[in-house]
Amino acid sequence: MDWIEKLYQTWRYKIKNFSLKKAMVVYLLCAIFGAALASVITIGLCHDWKNLIKRVNGIEEDYQYAGDGSFVIYYKTRGSVRVREDGLIRLGKTDTFFFQMLSFVQMFCIPAYSVITVFLVSFFYYKNRLKEPLLLLKLEMEAVKRNDLSFSCFYGSADEMGEICKAMDLMRKAVVDNQKHMWELMEEQRKINAAFAHDLRTPLTVISGYADMLMEYYPAGQISEKKLMEGLSSMKEQALRLKTFSETMKKVDSFEVLEVKKRKYQTEDIKKKITDFARGMEGEDTPEIAVSMESDGGEIYCDENIILEVLGNLLSNALRYGKEKIEILAVKEGDGLFIYVKDDGRGMTKEELYRADSPYYSDKTYEEAGQEMHFGLGLTICKILCKKHGGSLGFANSVEHGAIVSAQFYVG
């Protein structure tokens, strides 16, 4: 009997994955077949019971039912139909009741079974095909309403209700991803604000200190002109630093709200744009820049400005640390575009590998060596732009020497 159970489960699974329209047809066909079979069986049983009542009362086949429990034999004479005097038999009250009841059942069983099957089809169709997914959708909406995004709206069927539940669950996951992304943006903004506030203390402290000194000693003539000019020069330098800070903050905010505008490019077009951009940043005193590209073919859908902005920041860092040669490798694989920038400098420390893309994080030894001051926002901007383009930013050290920064973009 196992094969029967297996066959039943197989067909049950197939029917469960039917579309709602096909499932309704199957249910209606089963209902019609059931109603017809029940009607045939009922009419046959009633006919047999009525024949049994007739036999018990000695009523032969020639007798015809005349109503009210009477059976008669008709004969024709001179163009008219008459009843034989010896051809009249009356049933008892009990037999008459049962005979009439059986005749009534025979007459009305078909419409009765039709109505019953309509109700049964409606009940089982709702129970088997609509009740569970509708309940899941209701629970999902209630969960979303109370901001609970942990409830999964999974319904194991390939019909329309299964697709709706799947779409609802995908929407829930999209909301979760959006909230996660918003939380990450808020956390990133919080870090930027905290770093910005921290770095503001130094110039404000310097300005405040010189202002207090000038207010205290200048009116009494206790400060020399040289000291005065030094103080004013320091205050101007710190004010310029504050101005630069505010401009960098504005730049970060503008990238946060940047809209990605993708266009279709051929692989060779992207390679040419990267090569031309790199050549534009290469100078007489800078390391040599080598550009190469690997591709699995196909078209690239990307925002050229975002890719070149990220590449510009990565190249700026590489040129700052590189000695003789910088390598750029662009790899198009599936729906991803990967750009690797490798320099032949000292590489990155463990702290730099972990914090390189943190807001306002910069190499202090580089600044202490008298190099141009920067605020450590280049890689932070790269990370923001890569995320905007559906990718990410990564850091590693080369096996030989130097650092490798990888930027990934979704270009499908």
Image: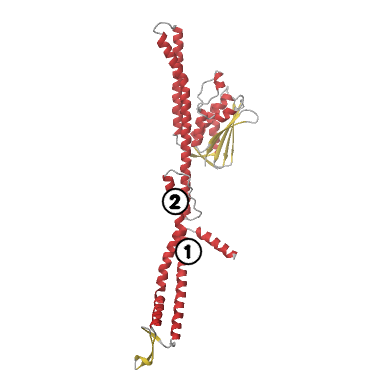
Identity of the residue drawn at 48% across and 41% down:
177
Residue at 44% over, 21% down: 242
User: Height in image: 25 above or below 259?
Assistant: below
Q: Earlier in the sequence, mark 1 or mark 2?
A: 1
Closest to the observer, 302 or 22? 22
Residue 226 seen in render: yes
Query: From the viewer's perspective, is the residue at label 1 or at label 2 nearer?
Result: 2
Task: Give the x, y percent position of residue 33.
Answer: 47, 69
Which quadrant of the structure image shows residue 7? Answer: bottom right
In this view of the protein, which residue sits in the foreground, 199 or 254?
Answer: 199
Looking at this view, name the residue that lies furthest to the right: 400
Q: Which residue type carries mark 1?
A: Val
Residue at far bottom of view:
78
Which x, y percent locates residue 141? 42, 48
Q: Nearer the viewer, residue 410 or 293?
A: 410
Total numbered labels: 2
Give the percent coordinates (x, y) of residue 15.
51, 60
Q: Which residue is mark 1?
A: 26
The residues bearing labels 1 and 2 have C-alpha atoms spaced at a distance of: 25 Å
Residue 290 showing in the rendered view: no
> What residue is at 46 percent from the left and 83 percent from the top?
52
Drawn side of residue 398 relative to residue 121, left or right: right
Residue 92's quadrant in the figure?
A: bottom left
Q: Element under label 2?
A: helix
Using the image, tell me which numbered label, if any, was put on residue 137. Answer: 2
Kind of element beneath mark 1: helix
Q: Quadrant of the N terminus?
A: bottom right
